[in-house]
Structure formats: C-alpha cells, structure tokens
C-alpha cells in the first residue's frame, strides 16, 4: 500500500470549514506583513487559522458553491511584548479587523524552544550550576522551556517569561529524562531572549543510571508475537469529498488548527445534525509538589504551546495499522511560511467486537452482528509527553473520544529514598521521581441535536423512601431537570448523574425530545486550590460540565491568550452574565482527565493510559438503529492451533 502526499497537489478547500490551504496561509501572512511593514523577520506569527464562517452560511452551502475565505491571525513583533490579533479576508486580500493587545502574551513557539535552550546554556550562572553538579560537557545538557504561569514575581511582571527544567544525557542518544539536574532553574525573558536569573536551590546528585527505551538499547527483543494483519480485501467503507468523510450513516468535516489540532465539524448521522463542532479546546497539567520551582508547574499544553503545532507525521504500519487514509496538515511557522505536517491525521476502520447478539433458546436460532468503528486520530508531542487524540464513530450512533497519554513522565531528581521528596511523587528509579500530577482536558461540544435549538437536562437516579409506596425499599427512578442558565455542574457518581443534550425541534416515537447523553465517567476531581496562582488560571477545572450559549468568540475556556494569564478571561467570567441556555443554541464544555500518580511501570517510557468520554444516542433513534446490518460471516477467520 502506498500513501499519497496530498501536499504535492494542493487542492482548494471544497467545504467552508476546511482548514486553510498552503496557498491561503502564504497569502494571509503577506497581507499581515504588508499591513505592519518593517524589516524582514519583524513580524512573527503565533497562529494563522481559518476564520470559520457564520453558521447560516455553512448551512446554506452546497458542494460546488463558491464561498468567502477568511483567517484569524495572532502575531507579535520581534523584541516587542504583546500580541496583535487580526481577521483577514483572503478572498478580498484585506484586513477586516485588528486589535492590539500589549498585555497579552503569545504561545511559546517551537522555533523558540532551541533558542531558549541555547540562551540558558550559555549563561555563566547556569554553567556554574552545572559544574557544581559535576557536569562539564554542556553539549549533553538539555533545557525544556516551561510556561511560567503568573506568580506576581516583581522581576517577571510585564514580561514574556519562561522558566525551565534541565536534564543531562550520558551520551548523545541517551534518554535525558533519566538524569534530572535537580534544583537548577533559569528564568528567561523570551522577548529579549535574555536570562533574568538562575535559581539554584541546592545540589542534588544527578542520578547516573541510564534508562533507555530504544530497541537498540534493549538486551534482547522478544520474538514470540506473530504478525496481525488488518485486511480489507474490498477496500474501505468510507469516501472522502475534500475533508468531508462519509462512512455508514455518518458525515463529518475534518478540520485542523495550530492550537486545538484535530477539530470535527458538521457531524451528522443519516442526514440528522448531532454536533456542529467538536474539539479538545484546552488542557492543563497541574502538578502537586510545593517544592522549589516545581510549585509553578501548571502548563496549558493547548493554549500555551498548541497541540496542532506539535502534531506528528504518522507512520503507516506503526502509528496506524490497516487500510489507512491520511490527511496532511498545514500550519504557519513563526515566519508566516506554511509548514507541512505530512500524514498528520489518520483515518481508518476497526472491528469492534460484536454489535449485538441474541440466542432464542427455544428455537435455537442465533442472530449476531459485528460492530466496527471509524477512527479519526492524530498524535502530538509536547516535550517529554505524547498525546494521542482518537475520535471514534460507531454504527449505532455513538461517538467516543479517547485521549491516549504516553511518552516520558516529567522527571525530578532526589537523594534516593528521601521521604520529603517522595511524598509528592513516586520514586520510579533510584534518585528519579515522577511527581503527582493530573492531565485535565476540556471538550468543547457545540451540539446540534436535530437542529440548533437544544436544552441540556441533568439526569439523576433517586430512590424512594421505604414506606407504603415502596414497601420493600427497592424503588428507584430517574429525575430530569433542565439547566436554565449558563454555568458549571459537577458529577455525582452516587446519583449516576449524567447530562442529556435534547432537541428543541424534534421528538422521538415516544413524543420525547430526541437526545444524546454525556456520562462524566472520566471526570477528574482536582486538588489545587481555586484561589492559588495556578488555580485562578484554570478555573474551568472546578466543574465537570459547563453550559454556555453559543458565541463564536467564546472558544477557549481559559481565554484566548493563556500564557501569563491571570484567570480573568474565560468561562468563569462568561458565565457571570447568567445568560439563559434552555432552548437555545448552546455549547457544552466537558472537563475530564487523568489523575496521574506515577507508577514504576510508567518509566522510562509510559505505556498508553487513557481517558475520554462518550456521547450516546438516548432517544435519538426510535429503536436500535443497527437492525439492518447484514449477518455476515467473516471468511478470513479460522480456528487457531487447528493443526495441533
Ligand atoms: Cu501524566
């Protein structure tokens, strides 16, 4: 099987919600550069992305129509703090709107990572700190830039700051994270690319034991696993029209941007709308150690770095197995030039066990159907960690999102066995700690169950008191309450609480609103204080579901600009307006995540751990929608060990 590099033959967008093309990104950069002027390299691009058209325009669109294209752009100027936001018409080659935000800070860009590292490694105080730890060869030292949060340090006020953590390799290909250089933290002003100070909290011996995960470094590789091939002899069951995929009864437009990565649009089943736009709009990783510089660790990997910017080019037969269709992704580099992530999005089908089965024991007749799912995925590497985003669509109308977290845990050094240090983490190897932390994600779900007008209801199971109406104490029932006003709700596992997105326009065979339900199975209680400097900036994590009325400018739950934010922008502020959400075009924000108390098995590279959520049809269909599946018998299946 061969893959086709679609970038070689760039095609104009066929649907108004498709991401910007290579040519469009170049054009946008040109318009903004011309507007600002100045020497080459003066304008630096944080992001260039599609300015999504109004919903009405998308609804009125049919394939073959021409449409306006426009972009949102965030730029900053070399040596100048602040961000300038733009909206640009690509069709008209004009600036539609711009806003100067001197107090906002851009994301930390990939192009800046190595510059920050080089700047810190050249600083005499940092070199001195390394010497104190018996590190002489600075070429083996690695420095990861971490967003600094907002901690009111006078020296950092008003700047664009990164702090840092460092490690040292024992040889050029060694796993650096096995050797944390503990207690040494440089704080850098990114705008000036100048080290502000080097904090040295005291020498902890650098752990010497190598812990490598590459195949070459393993003493022996096992050979007892026979190949598994996924074969679709008649080809795949999906078809692409530009970036729209049609599979089974599903139709989905696949988007992508530098910040959120994968986005899905106009999701429908059998022509019935379910979700206008779905994405993972933010994520934050709060750490739990109060010690030294570790107390600042609270990174927003989407808002401060961008999962799209850090997306991988995926490899056939390794990242993706079977009959794979890839989509290329274009994003803007810091210089505004289009940058290609070849094979950034993977699409394939998977067998998923049985869909349903019944044996009528009286007639001895059995009916069984196979399930399968469509998988749309991408993987991003944020420093030491990998995040795999997997959207699944099932034959019976279910939608599932799964985040797979893998890669290398953030490691910290300690004197082996130090009880003070190991209180806030697990010593995963002598002198190496994986600190307690969480990975909290927010799915922005612009639901459109059979139309834009929806209502969210909270569904709880309650028990009747034992008494004349419940003589045996067995009675329980579901109570459903509409959410009238925007705000946040928490899960309650003891009442089996879940939420339902109900249509305002359509009813099912029983006369009830057609609906999808969201169960908060991976909601993740947090342990940060909401009044702490990190807690204030991630206010969204203190509820498991937020409901707001649709507003195209309310995109990210911690605000547009998260780096160095103080928490005043975002969902906690929006909901103070107390806008009504019952029977309106609304957005659900589901907060879920991983509570990560690191294990020895997470080291030196972590097997995938998973979190996510499901959206299940709940009265959306009048009955099981998969009765029309054929009772096929898979002809490639065989009896294992038949010859023995
Ligand atoms: Cu983790």
Image: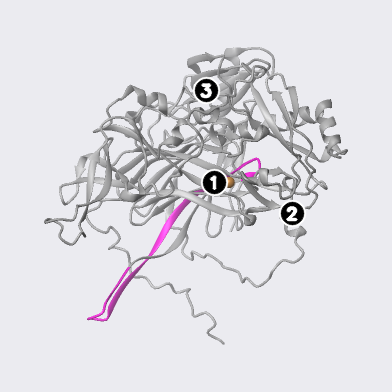
Q: Which mark is residue 212?
A: 2
* 392 versus 505 height, above or below: below
Which is closer to the viewer, label 3 or label 1? 3
Q: Is label 2's Cβ within 8 Å of ligand 1?
A: no
Q: Which residue is mark 1?
A: 378
Which quarter of the image is occupied by the N terminus?
Answer: bottom right
Residue 554 appears in the rendering:
no
Q: Nearer the viewer, mark 2 or mark 3?
A: 3
Q: How far across and down, in percent of the image, does residue 82 sit?
A: 59, 17
Left/right of residue 364 with respect to residue 147 in the rendered view? left
User: Percent position (x, y) of residue 228?
Assistant: 57, 68
Q: Nearer the viewer, residue 215 or 8?
A: 215
The Cα–Cα distance between marks 1 and 2, rounded to whole angstroms, is 25 Å
Q: Which residue is mark 3?
A: 566
Circle on res. 92:
none
The magenta stretch is 357-385
Q: Residue 356's image quarter? A: bottom left
SS class, disc 2? loop
Near mark 2 (Cα within 10 A), the count class, few <14, some 14-19 or many ≥20, is some
Residue 550 coordinates in the image, percent (x, y):
34, 29
Secondary structure character of the magenta stretch overall: strand
Residue closer to the observer: 167 or 517: 167
Mark 2 and mark 1 in contact (Cβ < 8 Å)?
no
Q: Does 601 sit left or right of 85 as displayed? A: right
Which of these two is toward me, 230 or 77?
A: 77
Q: Secondary structure at mark 1?
A: strand
């Amino acid at each position: 099987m061969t893959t086709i590099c679609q970038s070689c033959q760039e095609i104009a967008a066929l649907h108004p919600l498709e991401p910007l093309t290579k040519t469009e990104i170049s054009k946008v950069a040109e318009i903004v550069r011309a507007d600002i002027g100045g020497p080459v390299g003066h304008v630096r691009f944080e992001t260039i992305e599609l300015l999504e058209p109004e919903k009405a325009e998308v609804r009125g669109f049919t394939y073959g129509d021409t449409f306006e294209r426009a972009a949102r752009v965030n730029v900053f100027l070399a040596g100048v703090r602040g961000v300038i936001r733009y909206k640009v018409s690509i069709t008209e080659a004009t600036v539609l709107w711009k806003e100067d935000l001197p107090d906002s800070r851009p994301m930390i860009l990939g192009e800046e990572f190595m510059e920050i590292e080089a700047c810190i490694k050249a600083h005499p105080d940092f070199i001195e700190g390394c010497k104190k730890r018996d590190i002489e060869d600075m070429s083996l030292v690695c420095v990861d830039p971490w967003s600094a949060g907002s901690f009111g340090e006078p020296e950092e006020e008003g700047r664009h700051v990164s702090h840092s953590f460092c490690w040292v390799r024992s040889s050029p290909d060694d796993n650096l994270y096995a050797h944390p250089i503990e207690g040494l933290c440089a704080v850098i002003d990114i705008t000036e690319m100048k080290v502000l100070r080097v904090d040295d909290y005291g020498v902890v011996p650098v752990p010497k034991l190598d812990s490598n995960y590459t195949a070459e470094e393993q003493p022996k590789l096992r050979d007892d696993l026979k190949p598994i091939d996924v074969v679709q002899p008649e080809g795949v069951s999906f078809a692409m029209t530009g970036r729209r995929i049609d599979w089974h009864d599903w139709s989905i437009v696949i988007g992508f941007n530098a910040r959120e990565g994968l986005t899905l649009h106009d999701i429908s089943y059998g022509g019935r709308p379910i979700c206008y736009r779905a994405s993972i709009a933010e994520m934050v990783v709060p750490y739990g150690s109060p010690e030294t510089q570790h107390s600042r660790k609270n990174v927003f990997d989407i808002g401060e770095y961008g999962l799209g910017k850090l997306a991988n080019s995926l490899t056939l037969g390794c990242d993706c197995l079977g009959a794979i269709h890839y989509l290329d992704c274009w994003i803007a580099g810091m210089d505004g030039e289009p940058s290609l992530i070849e094979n950034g999005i993977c699409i394939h089908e998977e067998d998923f066990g049985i869909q349903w089965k019944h044996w009528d024991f009286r007639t001895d007749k059995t009916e069984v159907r196979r399930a399968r799912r469509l998988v749309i995925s991408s993987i991003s590497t944020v420093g030491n960690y990998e995040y795999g985003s997997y959207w699944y669509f099932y034959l019976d109308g279910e939608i599932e999102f799964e985040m797979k977290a893998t890669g290398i845990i953030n490691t910290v050094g300690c004197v082996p066995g130090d009880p003070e240090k190991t209180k806030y983490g697990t010593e995963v190897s002598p002198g190496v700690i994986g600190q307690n932390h969480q990975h909290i994600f927010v799915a922005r779900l612009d639901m459109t169950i059979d139309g834009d007008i929806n209502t969210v209801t909270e569904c709880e199971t309650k028990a009747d008191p034992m008494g004349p109406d419940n003589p045996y104490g067995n009675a329980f029932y579901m109570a459903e309450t509409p959410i009238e006003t925007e705000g946040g709700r928490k899960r309650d596992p003891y009442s089996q609480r879940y939420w339902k997105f109900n249509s305002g326009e359509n009813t099912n065979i029983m006369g009830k609103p057609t609906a999808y339900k969201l169960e908060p199975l991976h909601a993740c209680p947090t342990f940060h204080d909401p009044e702490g400097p990190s807690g204030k900036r991630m206010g969204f994590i203190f509820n498991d579901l937020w409901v707001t009325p649709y507003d195209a400018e309310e995109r990210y739950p911690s605000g547009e600009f998260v780096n160095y934010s103080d928490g005043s922008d975002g969902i906690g502020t929006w909901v103070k307006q107390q806008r009504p959400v019952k029977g309106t075009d609304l957005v659900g924000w589901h907060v879920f995540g991983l509570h990560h108390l690191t294990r020895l098995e997470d080291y030196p590279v972590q097997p995938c751990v998973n979190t996510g959520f499901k959206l299940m049809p709940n009265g959306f269909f009048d009955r099981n929608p998969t009765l029309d599946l054929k009772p096929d018998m898979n002809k490639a299946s065989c009896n294992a060990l038949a010859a023995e």
